[in-house]
Amino acid sequence: MKLFFRKYFEATVFAIGLFLLALMDPAVSNGPSLCLFDQLGFTFCPGDGLGHSISYTFRGEFSNALESNVLGPFAILVLSTRIIYLLIKNHN
């Protein structure tokens, strides 16, 4: 069980994260901010709107996704590629 957990932990966390972002309603933004830059008082954050952008991308609203953060669709591609790589690597 420990070996299974160790082998698939990263892929599972990334997959669950993408799944939850796909289910998130991007129009609602009333939750607490988890941004370290925001917590430290900076007004600019490079990841600001990334979760919303990913959620908009999953909904097919690409103009809203790019408006929220231009790296959202790219983040989906990178995370999906990483998940597939980890699953293939650990399966063999």
Image: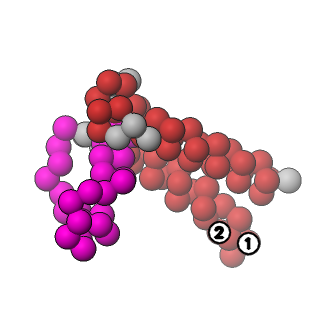
| Left or right of 80, for residue 18 | left
Q: Is residue 31 magenta?
A: yes
Amino acid of disc 1? Leu
Q: In the figure, is residue 62 to the left or right of 81?
A: left
| Residue designated by label 2 | 5
Secondary element at tag 1? helix
Q: CA distance from mark 2 to mark 1?
A: 5 Å
Residue span colored magenta = 27-55
Which residue is depicted at the point 64% across and 43% down? 81
Of 14 and 68, which appears nearest the observer?
68
Q: Name which residue lies at 17% across and 43% down.
A: 28
Q: Position of residue 18 (x, y in %)?
A: 46, 46
Query: Dot 2, crowdedness within 10 Å: few (<14), some or many (≥20)?
Result: few
Judged by its main secondary structure, the magenta piece is: loop
Outermost residue on the left side: it is 30
Establish if 11 lies above or below 66: below
* Residue at 24%, 74% in the rendered image: 40
**Label for residue 11?**
none
Q: Residue at x 69, y 75 (%)?
A: 2
Instruction: Return the x and y of residue 57 as percentages of the image width and height.
Output: 39, 31
Verify CB contact (< 8 Å) between mark 2 and mark 1.
yes
For mark 1, does the 10 Å Cα neighbourhood hold few (<14), some (14 to 19), or many (20 or more) residues?
A: few
Q: Which residue is mark 1?
A: 3
Locate the N terminus by quadrant: bottom right
Q: Is residue 20 magenta?
A: no
In the figure, 18 relative to 56: above or below? Answer: below
Visible in this render: residue 22? no
